Amino acid sequence: MNKNNNFNTRTLNDLSEIKFASDMANLSEKIFSDYAESLAKQIATNGTKNKRTQIRKFYDEIIMWDDKVNLDNNEYNKSKVLFKMMKAKIAYSLGREYIDENFKNMFNTLIDQVNNANTLRQFKLFFEAFMGYYRIEKKD
């Protein structure tokens, strides 16, 4: 087995621990610390892809959506089709080789859990924690 396949397996195992919930009280206490740090370390190991500036673009868009929705489920329902279009943007970045399969898998797995304004906020907070750890790990 080559190193890359092993890497993908580890990332998916970590992702299975991340579950967004109906409210913050039901989240794992490790979601914004241990899990975010573990995924940041794993994704940062690809030296030529997953540049911080590229990943920051996705984080900025998540912030924009969270600000637009502002914990209002009606607003989320009006915007969810466009929000979920971020998966197409991830696919485009993968096709351009700006990101790798591991980042795509993480992003898509997490965005698939977003189904209301609360889970969108949790996604944003997770990504914020991920970015903090990623800044330490990726020196580009």
Image (tube, rainbow, N blue to C red):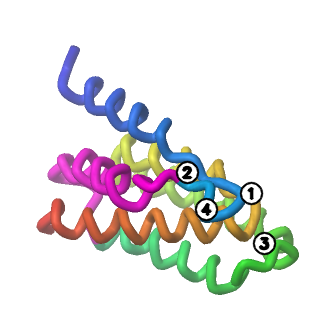
Looking at the picture, tell me which residue is in the foreground, 80 or 48: 80
Residue identifier under label 3:
76
Q: In what element is the residue under mark 1?
A: loop
Q: Residue at x 59, y 62 (%)?
A: 86
- In the rendered image, residue 65, in percent from the top left (x then y), is placed at 63, 77
Residue extent of the magenta highlight: 28-52
C-alpha separation, residue under disc 4 versus residue under disc 1: 17 Å
* Label 2 to label 3: alpha-carbon separation: 16 Å
By secondary structure, the bulk of the magenta-drawn segment is best described as helix
Q: Are marks 1 and 3 in contact (CB under 8 Å)?
A: no
Callout 2 secondary element: helix
Q: Does the magenta-highlighted stretch encompass residue 34? A: yes
Name the residue carrying label 4. 25
| Residue designated by label 1 | 115
Crowd band around label 3 with a 10 angstrom C-alpha radius: few (<14), some (14–19), many (20+):
many
* Labels 4 and 3 touching (C-beta < 8 A): no
Secondary structure beneath label 4: helix
